[in-house]
Amino acid sequence: MNIFSIDSGFYRFLEKFTNFFLLNLLWFLMCIPIITIFPATAAMFGVVRQWVQKKDSGVFKSFFVYFKENFKQSFLLGLLWFVFALLFYFNINISLQMSGIAKIIMVSSLLFICLFFVMTTIYLFPVMVHYKMRWTLIIKNSFLFSISQLWVTIRCILILLLTVLISYVIPISSIILWSIGGYLTYALCDKSFKKIELLVQDNV
């Protein structure tokens, strides 16, 4: 057995682990002010996009480049998404105070809409960093991707749920788990982008 190949493999593993750890740390620190959660998440997806596409990029420099580049758009989208989330929360609470068939219809309708809201959110950041477009088109295309690539959407939701679950059960895993979750999510979304782009090219 070649000891150099072992050292090389271990070095590559250590380098990837360090990069994911540093990206996770940057994302967490930049999320602390709360209002920067969306810009920080956009920056994290910008970095993992580079990794998925096999482009060499430093974690710190790339993160802050994407943070600055997407700040305004992601911040405004974050505000809009927060308002939507509040509206869902208050409407569901109001619906729960109803009785009879009206309660069942209202709660079911709101939960159905919430499902599409979550599905659209899954694609929001990958679409934002992959395509340069207006915020209205980001929302529209995120929704269309989430519906047309339903199996990918389901897998991305499972990754998110698994990330939340593991972070809750093993809190120490949070030091690296969210950047890995972001990477896996973008890797799946990237395949969807390429698939749709090929279909569009074939139909031109």
Image (tube, helix red, strand yellow):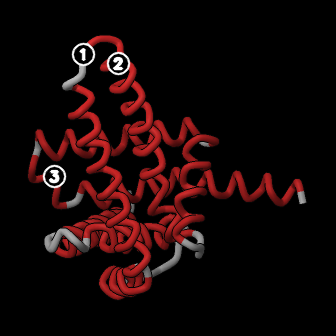
Instruction: From the top left corner, tell me how far across and down residue 153 is, in percent.
Output: 50, 42
Q: Earlier in the sequence, mark 3 or mark 1?
A: 1
**Position of 80 relative to 103 (above/below):** below
Instruction: From the top left corner, tell me how far across and down residue 68 is, in percent.
Output: 37, 86
Q: Provide the residue designation for mark 3.
A: 173
Q: Seen from this angle, which residue lies furthest top?
A: 100
Label 2, residues with CA under 10 Å away: few <14, some 14-19, many ≥20:
few
Residue at left offset 40%, top offset 44%: 118
**Position of 145 relative to 75 (above/below):** above
Q: Earlier in the sequence, mark 2 or mark 3?
A: 2
Q: Provide the residue designation for mark 2.
A: 102
In the picture, measured across the screen, residue 35 lies left or right of residue 107, that is left
Three-letter amino acid code of the residue under disc 1: Ser
**Position of 169 relative to 60 (above/below):** above
Label 2, label 3: how many angstroms apart (C-alpha)?
A: 43 Å
Residue at left offset 21%, top offset 34%: 93
Label 3, residues with CA under 10 Å away: few <14, some 14-19, many ≥20:
few
Question: In the rendering, which numbered label is found on residue 99?
Answer: 1
